[in-house]
Image: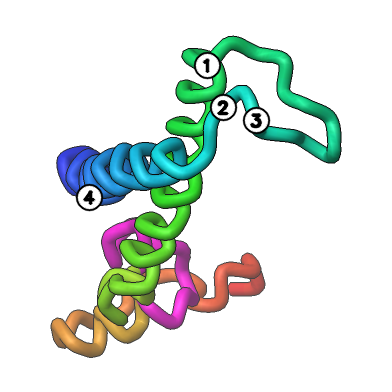
């Protein structure tokens, strides 16, 4: 599971990094950092700080877009599968019942509703 998460994080951050670099090159090829204004007030920071802030802004925006893409491309199995195995689900869980029906196992002794009423 952790390698899958690491893989997804890399699917998000690496393309976002590349696109942020290209976006920064294009943006600052057109706009000079000393001419930028924020809410009508000139930005009083050195050029390197503006370049750095611009890069991280572009990286955050493209990472958000990549994260949305990775989130939306998940299969129905990944979305609907319970985080626990069927045996670890609570008694009376519909997914536990469906798993037992699929395997042909009889319900275990005890209350299937899980409310302690016998």
Residue 64 is a magenta residue: no
The residue pinned by badge 1 equals 47
Q: Which mark is residue 33?
A: 2
User: What residue sits 18% from the left and 45% below the top?
Assistant: 7
Distance between mark 2 and mark 3 Cα atoms: 5 Å
4 or 2: tag closer to the N-terminus:
4
* CB atoms of marks 3 and 1 within 8 Å: no
Image quarter of the C terminus: bottom right
The image quadrant that residue 87 belongs to is: bottom left
Q: Residue at x 40, y 48 (%)?
A: 63
Q: Which residue is mark 4?
A: 11
With 22 as the anchor, is 94 left or right in this view? right
Please give left or right for residue 99 compared with residue 47 in the image.
Answer: left
Badge 2 element: helix
Q: CA distance from mark 4 to mark 3?
A: 35 Å
Regarding residue 107, the answer to whether it shows in the image is yes
């Amino acid at each position: 599971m952790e390698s899958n998460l690491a893989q997804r994080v890399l699917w998000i951050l690496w393309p976002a990094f590349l696109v942020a670099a290209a976006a920064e090159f294009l943006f600052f090829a057109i706009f000079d950092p000393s001419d930028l204004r924020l809410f009508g007030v000139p930005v009083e920071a050195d050029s390197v700080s503006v370049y750095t802030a611009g890069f991280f802004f572009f990286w955050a925006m493209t990472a958000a877009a990549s994260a949305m893409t990775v989130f939306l491309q998940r299969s129905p199995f990944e979305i609907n599968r319970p985080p626990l195995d069927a045996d670890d689900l609570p008694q009376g869980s519909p997914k536990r019942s469906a798993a037992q029906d699929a395997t042909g196992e009889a319900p275990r002794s005890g209350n299937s509703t899980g409310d302690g009423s016998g």
